[in-house]
Image (spheres, grey):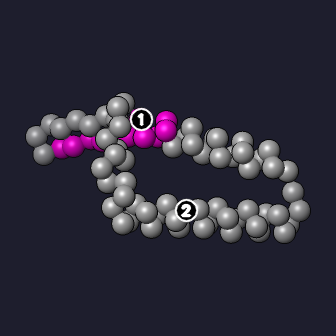
Amino acid sequence: MAMPDVGKTLVLVGLAIACVGALLWSGLGRSWIGRLPGDIHARWGNTEVHFPLGTCILLSAVLTLLSWLLRGRR
């Protein structure tokens, strides 16, 4: 990969992260992020443990699909 391509990729990834962050900050994702089937949440007295397994799997699938689509354009 040539250096200008790396720069373009970094800018696009940064913009995508900023857009997703802005959407989450606006409250769009509060209703479902961390509450998907497969997310683990346990309470013992004053202790809470939360592991968003379902959310991680969904995010991994979306990012994999996105990388396949972007790699196929070259």
**Location of residue 51 (image quadrant):** top left
Segment colored magenta:
47-58
Residue ID at (65%, 46%): 66
Mark 1: amino acid: Gly
Confirm whether the magenta stretch covers residue 21.
no
Q: Which mark is residue 8?
A: none
Give the SS element for disc 2: helix
Q: Mark 1: few, some, or many residues within 10 Å (few <14, many ≥20)?
A: some
Q: Which mark is residue 17?
A: 2
Mark 2: amino acid: Ile
Residues 37 and 2: in front is 37
Confirm whether the magenta stretch covers residue 50.
yes
Q: Position of residue 8 (x, y in %)?
A: 76, 67
Q: Position of residue 7 (x, y in %)?
A: 77, 68
Residue ID at (22%, 35%): 42
Residues 24 and 44: in front is 24
Q: Which residue is mark 1?
A: 54
Q: Position of residue 48 (x, y in %)?
A: 21, 43
Give the SS element for disc 1: helix
